[in-house]
Image (cartoon, grey):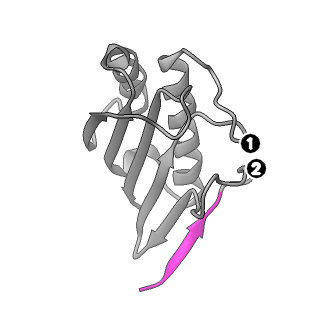
Amino acid sequence: MSKTSIIPAGSGKPLAPFVPGSMADNILYVSGTLAFDKDNNVVHVGDAEAQTRHVLETIKAVVETAGGTMDDVTFNTIMITNWDDYPALNKVYAEYFPGEKPARYCIQCGLVKPDALVEIASIAHIG
């Protein structure tokens, strides 16, 4: 098995020892993604809809860097800090996955930075 790190142009340095994406045998694993700027500061504080959009745009950049599209995403793990933000998350999520939906699960939990409201990790099959 060959493994390739996927790092979109302009990516900031991760908070921990990981890469934005890892490709093995045409399967792309996208690391848990938060609404961070290039300096790992949370953006859109208090706005779950805007944070979800930022997270999905970041995931889209990883997928596209690997040669795929969001249609190639087959599974998402979603972490949310407050169930009250679930409708806002789903509104934006539906925009990024308008057709055939990927499988997913969603849990409520604490995230690495208190102002982060949403984290999503993805798996995509490319090619």
Of residues 36 and 56, the one nearer the viewer is 36
Answer left or right for 74 relative to 12: left
Mark 2 or mark 1: whose residue is earlier in sequence: 2
Magenta-span inclusion, residue 66: no
- Corner quadrant of residue 119: top left
- How far across and how far down the image is residue 92, in percent? 43, 22
Q: Please name the residue that numbered disc 2 is placed on.
A: 10
Q: Give, as a single range, the part of the protein colored magenta.
A: 1-7
Q: Amino acid at mark 1?
A: Lys
Identified at 28% across, 35% down, the residue is 107
- Corner quadrant of residue 93: top left
Identified at 55% across, 15% down, the residue is 46
Of residues 105 and 101, the one nearer the viewer is 105
Q: Amino acid at mark 2?
A: Gly
Within 10 angstroms of label 2, few (less than 14), some, or many (20 or more) residues? few
- How far across and how far down the image is residue 116, in percent? 53, 29
Q: Which is in the foreground here, disc 2 or disc 1? A: 1
Residue 25 in sight from this viewpoint:
yes
Q: Please name the residue that numbered disc 1 is placed on.
A: 38
Q: Secondary structure at mark 2?
A: loop
Within 10 angstroms of label 1, few (less than 14), some, or many (20 or more) residues? few
Magenta-span inclusion, residue 2: yes
CB within 8 Å, label 2 to label 1: yes
Q: Secondary structure at mark 1?
A: loop
